[in-house]
Structures are given as structure tokens and as C-alpha cells.
Image (spheres, rainbow, N blue to C red):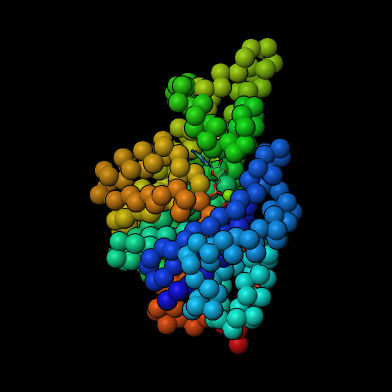
Amino acid sequence: PLVLGIESSCDETGAGIVRGTELLTNTVSSSMEQHVRFGGVIPEIASRAHLEAFVPTVRAALAEADVSLAEVDAIAVTSGPGLAGALMVGVAAAKALAVATGKPLYAINHLVAHVGVGLLGDGGELPEHLGALLVSGGHTEILAVESITSDVRLLGSTIDDAAGEAYDKVARLLGLAYPGGPAIDAAAADGDPRAFAFPRGLTAGKYMGSAEKPGPHRYDMSFSGLKTAVARVVETFQAARQPVPVADVAASFQESVVDVISRKTVLACTEHGITTLLMGGGVAANSRLRELVTERCARHGITVVVPPLSLCTDNGAMVAALGARLVSRGVAPTGIEFTADPGLPVTTVAVPAAG
Ligand code: ATP
Ligand code: MG
Ligand code: FE
């Protein structure tokens, strides 16, 4: 099926088009530059940017794929989780398109859509015993994907800041530019990851529990204590009127983040029989994270798959890919009786039709 996918959960307006498992186009407009001076995504600005970018982005996608709206078999849109106001713009626009064209509409889960990237190309089949590690500015989640259309479970997530959010906040403490991920990644290259012993959130024995008696945070992560620890170190140098060793702090911070994420991921995967791990989200761009996750997974026979970065960050193609799979599996469309749901649980792959 030919499917148009629409994404607006954060600061990217995405329109992607797929034919079955073939990617035709992936058009993305980001409002990231408009958030730079605030050091983080401002929801109201993101919503307004979606409003302005929606029509040009969809038009560009259709032109690039050389298809007309009339040829499209179905429309898929991210309905959650994400920023309420941002989601509402994409949802309203997708409903309007569906009503105007009479096309079936699927309301899709953003997190599951990130995994849907794995459907594109290469025969279009996901490996069995699949897991996913999603790390971005708004998400830090470990998922078990038994079936992408019907059985996705959340194994672990951050209990406070998302990994990318921690990067952005720490970059600000260090006087580095937004987005903080690439800035810290670059600064860390010249630093010593052992210079500062920063805390590893929720990895002490009492949080890890045991397989028989799981602790409450067995696969969960925490990054707010780490952020505070970095702030204390920065303050100490400033109080002593000494220059902050930015490279060493960045490298030590990064090592803590990737250590926690990779440890929790490997633990969740081995205890759930996961043999392939798909990475997604903007933080998947981090070279040290990829390295450590791949190294630790390899020790347990887990294969790590990292899609191209343009498909890791938020985009419409992943929404279209999941939509196309739902269509070909004969899943009924949602219709237009649904609303954006900022807290949509990962177990809801697509919102079922009302009534
Ligand atoms: P969502 O959470 O809804 O998926 P988002 O816009 O917050 O959306 P992305 O656009 O996928 O997330 O990713 C942006 C985040 O990724 C930012 O927090 C940024 O700092 C981080 N990031 C980008 N490159 C790197 C990198 N090399 N290392 C670490 N973090 C990175
Ligand atoms: Mg983004
Ligand atoms: Fe995302």
C-alpha cells in the first residue's frame, strides 16, 4: 500500500511516503533553530512552527515521491506520546486530509513508529526476538517488540530526565551550544572519561534486584542526579575562580550516561530473550553510546542495528512504514474519532476505532 505518514510530536514536522516496505520520500522540517536561544524545545514555538510547516512539508513529500494525494491508500499520523500542542497540529491536519480525500486514517504510536523504521528495505521483515532502545530529547525507553502490530511492551524507561534532555541541560551548565548532544560529544573527544566519578543512576544493587525478585527500577534509568552532580563540580571550579575543565567534565558525564543506558539495555535484553536490538532517537547519533551498547550486546550474542540518522530522529517515514504494515495486516483504521494523547502507552500500537 501507498501510505503518507505525518509526524509532529516534538520539534520536527515530518511527512514521509512509503509503498509497502519501500521508502519513497522522507521530508522533514525542524524548528530546532528557533529553540536554540532557550536551550530546549519550547512547546508553543514548536506548535506554531508545525502549523506553518505542515502544508509545504506534505506538498514537498508528494512532489518528491511523484505521487498525488488521490493515489495514497491510507494516511497515518502520530497521535502520541509527545507534546500536546505539537501533536494536536499534526492530528488536526491529518484528520482534515482524511476527511477531504476520504482516505482511511491510522492514529499511530510515536515510539512504535521509531521501531517501524526497521521495516523499510531489506525484505521488510523485522527480526524475531526484537528489542528497541529509543533515546532522544524526550524519550529513554527499552522496548520488547514481539509483534510490531500487536505486541509491544515497555521494559524500562527514565524516571526523570530523558538522555538527550540531560545532554542539553549539562551543555548549558558547561556553556556549550544547543543542541547539547553533538556539542558534548565533540568536547568529550578531548577529555578523560575517568576524570570525574559521576553517579550511575539506579544501578546500585538495591535497584537492580534479581531476576527472581526484581527491584522496582530494574530496567529503569535516572539522569537528574547526574545532572546535579555535574552542576556541583562546575560550581566548585567557579567558586575557586578556576576554569572549568569542560572536556573532562563532558567526557565523564557522557561515560556515565552511556554506561547506565548500555547496562540497563543489556540486562533487559538478556532477561527477555531479545537477540536483536534496534536503536532509535537523536541520541543514537552518539558514537560512544553506539560503541558501548554494541560491545556489551556482542558479549551476550545480541546484534545491534542502527538505522541511518535521518530515520533515527523524528520523521514521517517511520509513521508511514508502520501505517503500511497495519494496512497490509488488515488492521482496521482509527477513523477520525480520536484525539492527540501525550501519554499514549506503548502497548497501543495504533488507536482502535471508536465504538
Ligand atoms: P522525541 O523525543 O519526541 O523523539 P526530540 O526532538 O526531543 O524528539 P530528537 O530530535 O530525536 O529528539 O533528538 C534530539 C536530541 O538528541 C537532543 O537532545 C540532542 O542533544 C541529542 N543528540 C543529538 N546528537 C547527539 C549526540 N551526538 N550525542 C548525544 N546526544 C545527541
Ligand atoms: Mg527533535
Ligand atoms: Fe522521537
Task: Dividing the image into four quarters, tell me where ligand 1 lies.
Answer: top right
Q: Position of residue 17 (x, y in %)?
A: 48, 66
Q: Residue furthest bottom?
A: 355
Decide if residue 328 is on the left or right side of residue 245.
left
Work out whether residue 9 or residue 293 is closer to the camera in this orientation and state it: 9
Work out whether residue 232 or residue 345 is closer to the camera in this orientation and state it: 345
Residue at 50 percent of width and 22 percent of height: 248
Q: Position of residue 231 (x, y in %)?
A: 63, 28
- Asked if one can make out residue 157 in the rendered structure from this viewpoint, the answer is no
Q: Looking at the image, is 291 positioned above or below residue 243?
A: below
Q: Looking at the image, is 27 positioned above or below residue 304?
A: below
Q: Quadrant of residue 223?
A: top right
Residue at 60 percent of width and 81 percent of height: 101
Q: Position of residue 40 (x, y in %)?
A: 66, 43
- Asked if one can make out residue 323 in the rendered structure from this viewpoint, the answer is yes
Residue at 66 percent of width and 58 percent of height: 53
Residue at 64 percent of width and 12 percent of height: 242
Quadrant location, the N terminus: bottom left
Work out whether residue 354 or residue 73 is closer to the camera in this orientation and state it: 73
Q: Position of residue 107 (x, y in %)?
A: 56, 72
Total number of numbered discs in the rendering: 0
Quadrant location, the C terminus: bottom right
